[in-house]
Amino acid sequence: MVKLSAGLLMFRTVNGRIELLLVHPGGPFWKNRDEGAWSIPKGEYTEEEDPLHAAEREFAEETGFTPRGPYIPLDPIRLKSGKRVVAWAFEGDGDPDQVKSNTFRCEWPPRSGQWQEFPEVDRAAWFSFSEARLKIHPEQVSFLEQLRRLRNAE
């Protein structure tokens, strides 16, 4: 069965240029990774769920911000893992320093028997298209490019 994920790409216009909000995954695996590690806020959902509703839920859980449409549908992507990711873009604003993420538990260090809690997202930031292209996980670049074409932006 194919895993499904849904997310939202928030953007804003500052001084005539579009900026994109990306999030950095929390936890020890991502701690020292930067370029190619960032993502749009997203998460898994089931076939019974409405994907847009799941994307709104995941955005709120990972950022603490309440997303508001209208939403611009983006073409889905399929990750190397086989997971299918659907996404929408929307115009909004928020202070990355105010991001408040839900948490997850994992055994850390591995096979230590010690369980720790980590934020799902440890930080967020606004990026230009060129900066975001370097920061975002390479498999998600398509979402940026689609929004750039739709908004005729640089």
Image (cartoon, rainbow, N blue to C red):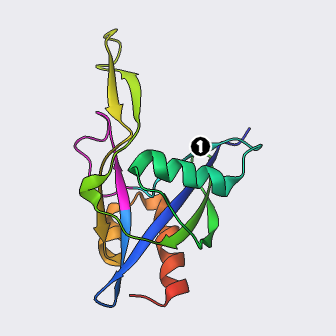
Answer above or below: position of 57 versus 92.
above
Residue 100 showing in the rendered view: yes
- Residue sitting at 39 percent across and 77 percent down? 12
Magenta portion: prevailing SS class = loop
Residue found farthest to the top? 113
Residue found farthest to the right? 48
- Closer to the camera in the image, 83 or 41: 41
Which of the image's four quarters has the C terminus?
bottom left
- Residue sitting at 48 percent across and 65 percent down? 9
- 116 relative to 7 in the view: left or right: left
Q: Quadrant of residue 31?
A: top left
x and y percent of residue 17 in the render?
33, 86
The magenta segment: 22-38
- Closer to the camera in the image, 17 or 113: 17
Amino acid carrying label 1: it is Glu
| Circle 1 SS class | strand
Residue 37 showing in the rendered view: no
Answer above or below: position of 137 versus 104.
below
x and y percent of residue 77 in the render?
61, 61
Question: Crowdedness of circle 1 by 10 Å Cα count: few (<14), some, many (20+)?
Answer: some
Which of the image's four quarters has the N terminus?
top right
How many callouts does the rendering have?
Answer: 1
Q: Which residue is mark 1?
A: 44
- Residue sitting at 39 percent across and 51 percent down? 63
Answer above or below: position of 127 versus 13.
above
- 106 relative to 122 in the view: left or right: right
- The question of residue 34 being in magenta is answered with yes
x and y percent of residue 134 in the render?
32, 66
- The question of residue 100 being in magenta is answered with no
Q: Quadrant of residue 133?
A: bottom left
- Residue sitting at 52 percent across and 85 percent down? 149
